[in-house]
Amino acid sequence: MQLLLTQHRDPNLRSYFVWGPFIRSDNEAAARENAQRFAAPNSMHFWTPTPKLGEDLSATLRLPAGRTAWDVFLLYTKRTFWDSSPPAPAYWQQQLEVVQGDPYDVTVFDAHIVRALESASRP
């Protein structure tokens, strides 16, 4: 993922990392360490002390009941508007071992990013 984030120097590409308490070792200090590890141009990192965003995303992504969306990679178009609940992404991948969403594959995700950037550059 690190290479993927640094190879695209397009101002239309932004990455947002939301770190939260999804596994026992997750805490704000670990999130700060991970933010350093995944530092990239046009990226921002956030810590949330609750799993609420992951729970809200679970509904949006139609994950099985009781599954929280974490370790997911979501691609949104430039014109996506976030309201009180997360919108459906244009494309997404996951490392949750569920049937929803494609399994994480950096090459495939990169191809979707390239297509999204090409679309964003068109009038």
Image (spheres, rainbow, N blue to C red):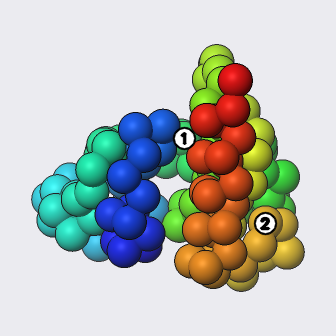
Q: Give neighbour class at mark 1: few <14, some 14-19, many 20+ (Cα, 10 Å).
A: some
Residue 55 in sight here: no
Check disc 1 and report the residue beneath it: 53
Q: Secondary structure under badge 1?
A: helix
Residue 48 vs 4, above or below: the answer is above
- Residue corresponding to mark 2: 101
Work out whether residue 56 or residue 119 is closer to the camera in this orientation and state it: 119
Q: Earlier in the sequence, mark 2 or mark 1?
A: 1
- Residue 64 visible? The answer is yes
Q: Residue at x 53, y 67 (%)?
A: 71
For mark 2, give the secondary structure.
loop
Position of residue 22 in the picture relative to residue 123 (left or right) = left
Q: Is residue 20 above or below residue 84?
A: below
Q: Nearer the viewer, residue 83 or 27?
A: 83
Left or right of 8? Residue 122 is right
User: At label 2, which amino acid type do we have?
Assistant: Gly
Residue nearer the viewer, 78 or 63:
78
Task: Measure the alpha-carbon separation of dots 2 and 1.
Answer: 17 Å
**Kind of residue at badge 1:** Leu
Q: Is residue 79 left or right of residue 52?
A: right
Q: Is residue 71 above or below residue 105?
A: above
Q: Quadrant of residue 85?
A: top right
Does the residue at mark 2 contact the one at mark 1 (Cβ under 8 Å)?
no
Q: How busy is the neighbourhood of tag 2: few (under 14 within 10 Å), some, or many (20 plus)?
A: some
Query: At which x and y percent is residue 13?
Result: 47, 44
Q: Residue at x 79, y 59 (%)?
A: 63
